[in-house]
Image (cartoon, grey):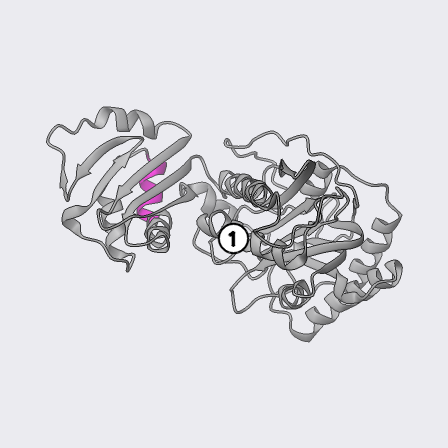
Amino acid sequence: MSDAVSPLALPFPALPAIAGVTPRIARAGYKDWGRCDLTYVEFDEGTAVAGVFTKNVCCSSEVEIGRDNARLGKARALVVNAGNSNAFTGYRGREAVEAIMAQVATHLGCAPEQVFVSSTGVIGVPLPKDKAKAGIEAALLAEPCTWEEAANTIGTTDTFAKGATATAMVGDVKVTFSAIIKGSGMIAPDMATMLGYVFTDAAVEPAFLQQCLSAANLGTFSCITVDSDTSTSDTVLAFATGKARNAPLVSADSPGADAFAAALADVCRQLAHLVVKDGEGAQKFIAISVSGAVSDESARKVGLAIANSPLVKTAIAGEDANWGRVVMAVGKAGEPADRDRLSIGFGGTWAARDGQPLADYDEAPVAAHLKGREISIEVDLGMGQGRATVWTCDLTHGYISINADYRS
């Protein structure tokens, strides 16, 4: 974790314990740092799991194995290594993951496929099997930790611990969610964009849990970007222990399924926003709302073209109301757009309507808006009913400094 905290940081929330979930942390020593860097979470038998994973074709063995095993729908443990992504490490990287799975499976008396592993950090360095083994041994003997301790342990360039919680009524039973996430750079939506873990005591069939997580991802993790770079390790996993004893949710028609899905989406949205607010070097949180597109997906792509534009992001960093850069980004998105129907605004003040500047445009309220920490950009394409919101941050000198010195 970085010493300099993001100006957009939020206090870590009070996350409730989740029945059937026990987190622990230990120090494996993956890097030369005086902190815990291995998180171990144990689940009671009967826990369901679902996941979304990076689409980066140079992904880690953790992602390849986890993607296959998530389809089986059962989980007994999660291991998260911080400081080493174990990506682009060939057979040695895969052997390290399999050794972790086997070690934990032997301890729990479960199938290795029920042990999920994530790693984050430098690419191209095989995960040291001896350090991983010793770290897991230490974690198995450790006392249960708090969610905040677990959130701090999975971080790398993060400047603050990130967590979220929500509840939902499933019939007459209250189900609870607690979630943690890490992410600060190499953040772009091509599934998820970080390592995130959602824990709930709800009883949910794995297939429906996967359906809900995939849907939540589309409007949250797949709508954020810091730097347009999709990590080799991106993973979001949801675990449901069933300890709330609600009538199991098996489909969208199950009583309470809509409330469960809404709460899961709420947690994912909270986490996604926290990642953007900790974007490397970020000083401003930017919400880009696109309407009038030919479809929701087209609106999302236009929003991402704006959010990923270095010219737009640096203009916001400089508090410059240069809406011409937004015009440029819309035009390069590769989506249906018409220059003569395009409208652009900042903070609720329209600068241009129907393809031309407003005659009475007053830049003063826009300039005042851009001095704040939370910025909104509104774009109306005037083409249809599609809409989407995308979240990003500004691009500052801090991003360069962090990434130029990342391995040192």
Q: Please name the residue shown 51% across and 64% down the image.
A: 55
Up the image or down, 308 lies above or below 377; here it is below
Please give left or right for residue 297 compared with residue 382 in the image.
right
Up the image or down, 44 lies above or below 103; here it is above
> Can you identify the residue that label 1 sits on?
215
Q: Nearer the viewer, residue 366 or 30?
A: 366
Prevalent SS, magenta region? helix
Q: How many marks?
A: 1
Please give left or right for residue 301 compared with residue 236 in the image.
left
Q: Position of residue 128 (x, y in %)?
A: 75, 63
Q: Please name the residue shown 50% across and 31% down the image.
A: 7
Q: Please name the residue shown 76% across and 62% down the image.
A: 114
Q: Please name the residue shown 74% across and 71% down the image.
A: 95
- Quarter of the view holding residue 163: top right
Please give left or right for residue 71 compared with residue 75 in the image.
left
Q: Residue furthest left?
A: 359
Tell me the amino acid under the disc marked 1.
Ala
> Is residue 397 something one can see in this rendering?
yes
Q: Is label 1 in a helix, a strand or a loop?
A: helix
Q: Position of residue 135 (x, y in %)?
A: 81, 54
Q: Position of residue 139 (x, y in %)?
A: 83, 49
Residue numbers of the magenta segment: 310-318
> Is residue 225 something one can see in this rendering?
no
